[in-house]
Image (cartoon, helix red, strand yellow):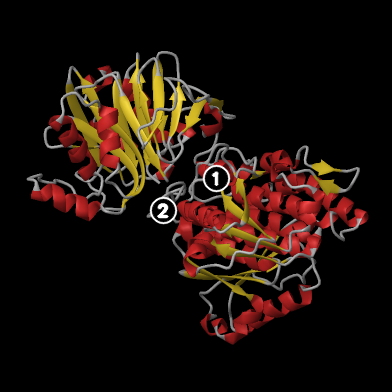
Amino acid sequence: MCGIVGYVGKGEATPVIVEGLHRLEYRGYDSAGLAVVHRGRLQVTKTAGRVQDLRDKLDVKQTKATIGIGHTRWATHGEPNDVNAHPHTDAHHRVAVVHNGIIENAEALRAQLTAEGVKFVTDTDTEALAHMVAAELAANEDLDLEAAVIAILHRVEGTYGLVFLDTKNPDQLVVARNGSPIVLGLGESEMFVASDVAALVRYTRQVIYLEDGEVATLKATDYHTTSLSGSAGGGDSHRVPTTVDADADDYELGAYSDYMRKEIHEQPDAIRRAVMGRCDERFATAKLGGVNLDARQLRNIKRVKFLGCGSAYYAGQMGANLIEELARIPADAEPASEFRYRSPVVDPDTLYVAVSQSGETSDTLMAVQELKRKGGQVMGAVNVVGSAIGRECGHGIFLHAGPEVAVASTKALTNMSVNFALLALLLGRVRDLSAANGARIVNGLRGLPSQASAILSSEEEIAAIAHRYAGASHMFFIGRVRGWPVAREGAQKLKEISYVHAEAYQAGELKHGPLALIQPDMPSVVIIPSDDLIAKNISTIEQIKARSGPVIALTSADIPEGLADATIRVPRAEPELEPILFNIPLQILAYHAAAKLGRDIDKPRNLAKSVTVE
């Protein structure tokens, strides 16, 4: 989940790399570093802290180099400090490497190298790779950097996205991938490499996503890829690049102070993109070409299971509820991180949906691979074209949320739920969902963007409530049935960006233990959709109030005035679709609580955007 950037070409490498690292800082921000080759010598600068701290330390001479690599880190092996920051080098400063992933046999490799006389200066798993490549090159003067990298990777176990730089081959970078994202960018007389296209779109939109087990060599005017088995792929440009559907403006803050607020406000447009062209009014159904299943195959699905992590898991719970309601097919959601470890029973009649904003989430990707090994039918729901999960599944749903930079997911989460509503509609209409009800859902989906805009217009009122309760040490989020996954996601948002401890509970479970925690300094957010459980939810509020617990009601229903200490109103939508809208005010609530507490909203402590390590 670290950020990697590399450049080789006619221009100055340092500004390109530092700018790319700045754009990838959401992937890791414990430390940052840069290595360039200038006049035949390796110049390395690295520091604990943010990319701006790195920028402040750079020597002006480093701006003259035309080749270099950079890294912004989310620590796994070794604490975040200047020494453990990437890039790492060998003892003679010939080879430098940046790495995203985890080398699982690092201890064995370090022990072997130590026995050979190597003295390690860091606590990282990555440093061993620099020493190993340097040793290969020293042992055979005819060996080129690519061959040396391939030779050492046969001894490496684990996940990696790697970029190597060699001072004696100062015109090339060698890149390798196994389980951690790497994308090549093709320019005019310059080449780029990064762990995310966000670092590249300012310079090129022509990219190649490396596959697992591939190695690439980049020079200013050409490139080629090869497999770890050493068999070349067929020439310097045998892989056809794809065009990224994004540009630099998509990653600019514009008038916003941070990305999370920007992305919250982009949700009406994101929902509109997800729905556009996918609603079939004539047959009152949905059109999801990427699902790639005909009506007969859709009817043969006996169960649907969503697999995701964090917010993607909670969105999967919302999707499961939608499918059971609209399609009357048993459905559930499970954390992808647990799925493959419990030796799951894989049913050939079950449709598995792997959910990931980045499409690179390691736990979810491994669950997909486990399913494929066992003959499971799996499709992806991802927000990044060309991502590992998208390629591994081969078909599925593209979320159309647009680039998301803030660590806390907002518009991607919302678009997951919208797309799952479309999937539920599609499955329902090939079964017993009537045309009238299908038309009702289609109209409801088309109305979501304007309803989302109405919620955003109430931001000041929601902010005032957030400020009022931001000083609480603990909060409950309470929901029933449709409101339960909303409550879980709301608690997640508050925890991850404000650091306020929050727990979600099903309303009916309060009296089975958690009610003991209710007291005057423990606010509860109670989710009340406009459904047949309004009376039950009002009763929940009364139980909390009877124990002097403050209540924030989030509702689209007509509840009694003064029932709650604070009320957040949500536009009334089709009952099945209301959870999609309920997420938005909870995002705003968490955002303004975090802002009141002075948190770094886009970069919450200990977290990173894309979890590409286990």
Q: Where is residue 329 in the image (x, y as percent from the top left)?
A: 76, 64
User: Does any portion of residue 33 appear in the rendered image?
Assistant: no
Query: Within the image, what quadrant is residue 222 found in?
Result: top left
Q: Where is residue 389 in the image (x, y as percent from the top left)?
A: 54, 46
Q: Position of residue 142 (x, y in %)?
A: 19, 23
Labelled disc at residue 532? none
User: Label 2 sits on what residue type?
Assistant: Leu
Left or right, 153 with reference to 607: left
Ranked by sequence position, the earlier of labels 2 and 1 is 1
Against 596, residue 325 (above or below) is below
Labelled disc at residue 392? 1
Left or right, 416 with reference to 221: right
Q: Position of residue 524 (x, y in %)?
A: 59, 71
Judging depth in this view, the residue of 440 and 140 nearest the camera is: 140
Which residue does the image show at 64% across and 53% down from the upper left? 584
Judging depth in this view, the residue of 272 and 132 nearest the camera is: 132
Mark 2 lies on a secondary structure that is loop
Labelled disc at residue 607? 2
Judging depth in this view, the residue of 284 and 393 nearest the camera is: 393
Against 432, residue 34 (above or below) is above
